[in-house]
Amino acid sequence: MTLTPTDTARAHATLPFDRLAGTTPLFRDYLSKAAALQPYLGPAFDDDEALRALAGRVTARAVERDALVAALTPLAEEVEASAAARSNLDRLKDADTLTVFAGQQTGLFFGPLYTLYKALTVEHWAAQLSKTLGRRVVPCFWLSTDDHDFAEVDHVCAPRGQQLVTLRYEPACAPAGDPVGRVHVDGSIESVLAEYAELLPDSEFKPDVFAILRDCYRPGVRFSAAFGRLWYRLFPQSGLVMVSPCNRDFKKLAAPYFEKAIRDDSALYQCYAETSEALERDGYHRQVHKTERQTFLFYQQFKRHSIHHGDESGFVWEGAEPVTREWLERMIRERPDYFSSNVLLRPIIQNGVFPTVGVVLGPSELAYYAQIGGLHDYFGVPRPAVLPRTSATLLEQSVRRRVDKLGLEFEALQKDADAEIARVLRARFPQDLEAKFDEAGRRIEEAFESVRPDVIGFESTLDKPLRMAAGRARREMSHVAQRAHAAHKRKEEETETQIRRLALQLFPGGGLQERSYNIVFYWARYGPELLSRLYEEWPAGVREHVLWEL
């Protein structure tokens, strides 16, 4: 592996994203500072002058800071936020305090690793920006509690042999269509915890890890709150502020954006459509597809339903009679908690309600953020700077040694594991072994035949013993050949098994490790020291994929 060291506290290796499968042209161009993307996004994350100008525009906007802090305080208490997080929350009342955001669905046991990486990245970026801008920048994490697809957050993955298995938490009362923020943990969680514990090898840390999981995800706790509680148990020193839109007081702050989304729906759609078409003309893909009949809102008094334009006039959603625009606007003012935003409007609300100067995004999020630059402008919300979420693979020392010993090409293992297995096997074992044994047998035959005339010339009775000896020699050579072939096959199978297990840990299903594995898998193996290292050394602003050696 040819790798480049980073400048983190302990040097870790990196890989350019163009050597990894699955990265989009838009993401790669953003990392290389492509000027073509500037019309779609905010200032570059490493342009200090532009960031200072953006900070001035953000603080000049009116933000209901006291109401915002009041809306967030109950969640801080519910998730048992750290002292540092509570201090940061209180500092949001100050007129010059800014925020930076990351966000994700509230996956079981903190979801896949990249969710953790987002949170770490935004916290470190906030610390860097505080120094750059000379003012407090508070790191925030948006919990996607309005999302209603529980199947996207109800599971955790772990290896079993050469396969990655998925364990699902299935509450006794399945939340069909309910926003995730309304789901509570019940006793069914215990079976998932027990099965997960069985899959992980025993260690000195494992009992404490699962005791913490049971405490965070105990019956009666909201599923999304358990997510937040676990973060502060993982990193009690963290200053990250959790934000849940599934809160009536927060919805009051979002209500003006909901009203505008209904009142100016056609104009907003044109903003979205024009920007999306421009992106496609520039050679980039459209991440979010939306029809003109779809609004930017959901109605969720009971279940969550997308609001559409009716066939003739007004608006409609599944199971409801058509309603007028005036009725919707009045309901938004009276019961904003009955409404939520779609994926395109959500960032506008986040960046408008908060004094947001920057956002941490993954590749897919970056793509749809490029589609909503015009929406930011329409709402009068400054486009935030975008920092790509640090992407990483946790590389155990034993795994690294096996990779080096086998001569594996890291990126080739992701792109085509079968081809890489074939390449390694060809390099490790002789391909002409059969021909060499045939040649050895021929030489044995020739050796006996070369002495036969002389032997039977002085003693004819030795002919039979000579032929028997030649036969025994041929049989012994054949036996050795059979054993060699068996050993060859066994070593091939052993090597293939090793490589497939390495591929499962590094690139499960051909994807990046961060998209499948959970932090519990490594936390239970390496204990709190690993968490401390991650928190203290995590890099922000890295333009390549990090190979974090454990």
Image (cartoon, rainbow, N blue to C red):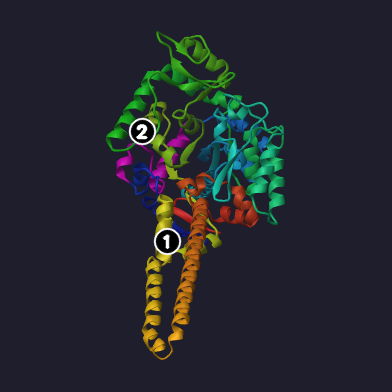
Q: Which residues are magenta?
A: 34-61
Please provide percent x and percent y for residue 217: 68, 38
x, y percentage for residue 27? 38, 44
Label 1 element class: helix
Q: Is residue 65 above or below residue 131?
A: above
Which of marks 1 and 2 precedes in the sequence?
A: 2
Q: Residues within 10 Å of mark 2 (few under 14, many from 20)?
A: some
> Which numbered tag is attached to residue 232?
none
Query: What residue is drawn where x is 51% and y is 51%?
Result: 504
Query: In the displayed structure, would residue 541 be above or below residue 102?
Result: below
Can residue 3 be seen by looking at this rendering? Answer: no
Residue that carries the numbered disc 2 in the rendered image: 286
Alpha-carbon span between mark 2 and mark 1: 39 Å
The quarter of the picture where residue 79 lies is: top right
Can residue 64 be seen in the rendering of this structure?
yes
Taking 391 as reference, is 284 left or right?
left
Which residue of the protein is positioned furthest toward the front in this rendering? 460
